[in-house]
Amino acid sequence: MFHWLEKNPFLFAVGVFLTVAFAGVVSILPSFAQTSRPVIGTTPYSTLELAGRQVYIKNSCNACHSQLVRPFKAETDRYGHYSLSGEYAYDRPFLWGSKRTGPDLMRVGNYRTTEWHENHMMNPAAIVPNSIMPGYAWMFKNIADIDTAYAEQLTVAGVFGVPYNKPVPMADGSTKTIKMGKTVEDARALALAEAKLVAADMKNQDVKDMVKNGKIPEIVALIAYLNSLK
Amino acid sequence: MENRPLEYDYTVAKWFMFAAIALGIVGMTIGVFIAFELAFPSLNLVFGQGLAEYTNFSRLRPLHTDAVAFGFTVSGIFATWYYVGQRVLKVSMAESKFLMFIGKLQFVLYILTVVAIVVSLFMGYTTSKEYAEFEWPVDIAIVVIWVLWGVSIFGLIGIRREKSLYISVWYYIATFLGVAMLYLFNNMEIPTYFASGGHGDWFHSVSAYAGTNDATVQWWYGHNAVAFVFTVPIIAMIYYFLPKESGQAIYSYKLSLLSFWGLMFVYLWCGGHHLLFSTVPDWIQTMGSVFSIVLILPSWGSAINMLLTLKGEWQQVASSPLIKFLLLASTFYMFSTLEGPVQAVKSVNAIAHFTDWIPGHVHDGTLGWVGFMIIASALHMTPRIFKREIYSKGLMTAQFWIQTLGIVFYFTSMWIAGITQGMMWRSHDEYGNLAYSFMDTVNVLHPYYTLRGIGGFLFLTGLFMWAYNIIKSASARPVEESELQSASPMGA
C-alpha cells in the first residue's frame, strides 16, 4: 500500500514531519497573542523579587509546589481566587508545577508573613509538625545574585517590552511604577533598599547583619518573591 | 561473497549500551533515594548540613528524571539504533569510515554533555521546565549531538542495500524529527548576559514565552517528549527485537501502518491534557482531552500487533525470560496508554492532577514499558555483540520477577496515594468548610511513600542483576565461533 513511500526516505521524512508538526501549528499559534496580555494590577517583578524567583527556580521549589489555582470551590477555599491568564504575563518561565507534594503558592503572599517564611525555610517541621519538606539553611548564607536578576530585567524590558520604569494601571484606577536601575550599581542599591525592608521583619541576627553590611542572602530575596505572590 | 552474512560493527552500540547501564543505575539510585526522602524526610540531611544543598529532594529530583530520561533511555535508543540500523538496512558501520567517526564523535560528545548536565543540575542551574531543565550552553550541545545522530541515520540509509525501510527505521526517523522540532521550540530562550550587555551569570537565560504561553509550549513539549523518547523509539525496538527473539513475523503490516501514522498525527494534540482547568484557552484543553482518548487507537494498535505476533508461540512466554520481558513490556504499554487517557478525562483529571497518581502513571510506563524494553534489547544484543552466550538465564528470570513485583508495588501505592489525596483535597464537611488541612493529606501518604520506595528499590535491584549478567556474559563466557545467526540462544 505505502511500499513506495518506504523506499523513499526523503519523502517519508517530509511526510512524518508535516504530520507531526501539524497539531503544534494549529493548536498553539492561534491564541498566542491573546493569552499573554496582563490583567489590570499585574506588575513586573522588582530586582530583588526576580532574584528571589531565581532562588526558587535554582532549588526546584516548583518540583513540589504549584502556582495554579484551579476554578474549584475546594481550591478557591484553600488558596484564594482562581488563576487568571493575565496574572502570569511577566512569568518567564511559568512556574505552575505539575505536582503538589506541598500546597499551592500562587497567592501565598496573602496569608504568610516574612517571619513565618523565615522560620519555616530554616526548619519546616518546627513550624508545621510532620512536614516532609526539607530545610533550606544554606539560603541564610548564600548571597543572592542581584546582577543576574538585573540582567534578566534588562533583557525582558529590551526584548519583550516589559514595562519597567513605566506606570502600570492598578485595579483602583491609580498607577504603580516598578523601578529598574539605570546601571548595575543602581540596581544593587534598589535591591538593597528593598532587602532592608524585608530584613526589618526578620529575627535572624546573621541575616540582619549581612543586609546591614550591604550583602543580600538568598533567603531575603526568596521571601521578597514569596511575599509578592498575591 | 554476496551470500556471506555481513560482519556488522557494534562498537558504538556497545558503548551506548554500557552508558545506558551506568546511567540507569545512577538515575534510579537517585530515584530510590528521593523516594525515601519523601517517606523519611530526615534523609535530606543524611550527608550532613554542609551537603544538604546538593542532596535534598528538590535539587535531586530533576537529576533523577533527566538521568533516566536522557541518560538511561536515550543511551538505550542510540545503542539499539547502532545495532538495529545496520541490520535492517543490511549495511555495516565498518563500510563507512565517515559514519563510524560520526558515531564515535556522537558518543564522546554525549558523555561530555552528560557530565555537564550532572554538574550543572547539582549546582542548581536549571530553567525549571520539566525535562527541559538545561541552560542554553547545554541545549546547544544537545542540538549538536542530535544533528550527529541525524547524520548517522540518514547516512546509513544513504548507503543501504535493503531498499525498503523496515518499520523500526520509520520510528527512529520519527524520533529524530519529532525531538528536534520539540526541543528547539521549547528551549527558545534568550541568554541574559549577552542581551543585557554583559551583566550577571553568562549561562543564565530567560524563556522566550511568558506565563500561559510558556505553559502551552512546555507541555506541548513535555507530553511529546514522552511520545518521542518514551514511546516512538521504544516501539522501534519492539518491532525489531520481538520478531527476532521469537522467530515470528510481525502479525500485520497494515496494523503497523495505521498505528504509525495514527500515532504521528494524534500524539501532538494531547499536550493540553496537562493543563486542564488551567488558564490555557478552553478549546486547547478540550482538544487535549479528546485526542488523548483517540490516542488509545494507535497505541493499542502497536501493542496488539506485538501480542498477536506471538500467536501460536505462547509457550515461549513460559520458556524464555527474554520473551517474558518483551510481552510484559507491550502489556504495560497497553496499560499505561489506557491509564493516561483516563486521567485526561476532565472529571478524572480534576482529582488526579497534582497528585501522586501522575508519577504512578509515569512509572508504570517508564519502568514497565521503557525499562523492560531497554533491558530486553540489551539482553538480546549482548550475545551478538560479544559473540558469547548469556551468562545466566536463571538470573534473567529472577530479575524479571523482582522487577515486575517492584513495578506493581510502585503503581498500586501511587494509585491509592493519588486518589486518596485528590479526594481529601476536595472534601468539604457538612458546613461547607474544607474537611482536611493540607497536612492531613500529607500524613496519610506516609505508608504509600514507603511502599513506593520499596518498589523502586526492587526495580533497582533488578537493574544491578541486569548489569551483572551483561558484564559476566561479556567477560566470563567462551567466545562462539561466529555471530549467533537466527534463533535466540534462549530458544536453542
Image: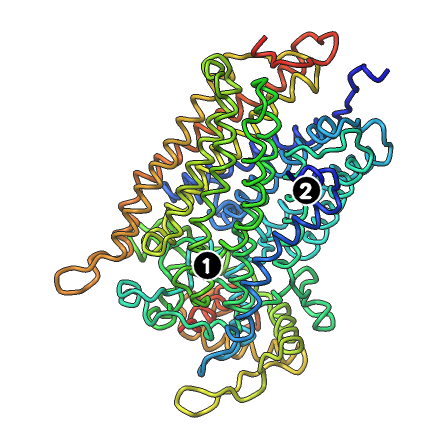
Q: What's the mark number on residue B287? A: 1
Residue at the (75%, 41%) spot, across then down? A8
Examine the image and state in which quarter residue B415 appears.
top left
Examine the image and state in which quarter residue B451 appears.
top left
Which corner quadrant holds the C terminus of chain B? top right
Vertical order, A73 against B251 (above or below)? below
The chain holding disc 1 is: B
Q: Type of residue at label 1?
A: Met
Residue behind mark 2: B173
- Answer with left or right where residue A104 lies relative to residue B385: left
Residue A160, how many percent across, how many down?
63, 76
Residue B154, how many percent across, how many down?
77, 41
Is disc 2 surrounded by few (<14), some (14 to 19) or many (20+) residues within 10 Å? many
Along the line of sight, which residue is nearer the eye, B65 or B210? B210
Q: Earlier in the sequence, mark 1 or mark 2?
A: 2
Residue B65, how many percent across, how many down?
53, 44
Residue B456, how many percent across, how many down?
44, 33
- List the single residue furthest toward the front: A1
Q: Type of residue at label 2?
A: Ile
- List the single residue furthest toward the left: B430
Vertical order, A96 against A170 (above or below)? above
Callout 2: SS: helix
Callout 1: SS: helix
Whether discs 1 and 2 lie on one chain: the answer is yes
Along the line of sight, which residue is nearer the eye, A214 or B145? B145
Residue at the (77%, 23%) spot, across then down? B8
- List the single residue furthest toward the bottom: A173
The chain holding disc 2 is: B
Mark 1 touches mark 2? (CB < 8 Å): no
Vertical order, B314 against B370 (above or below)? above
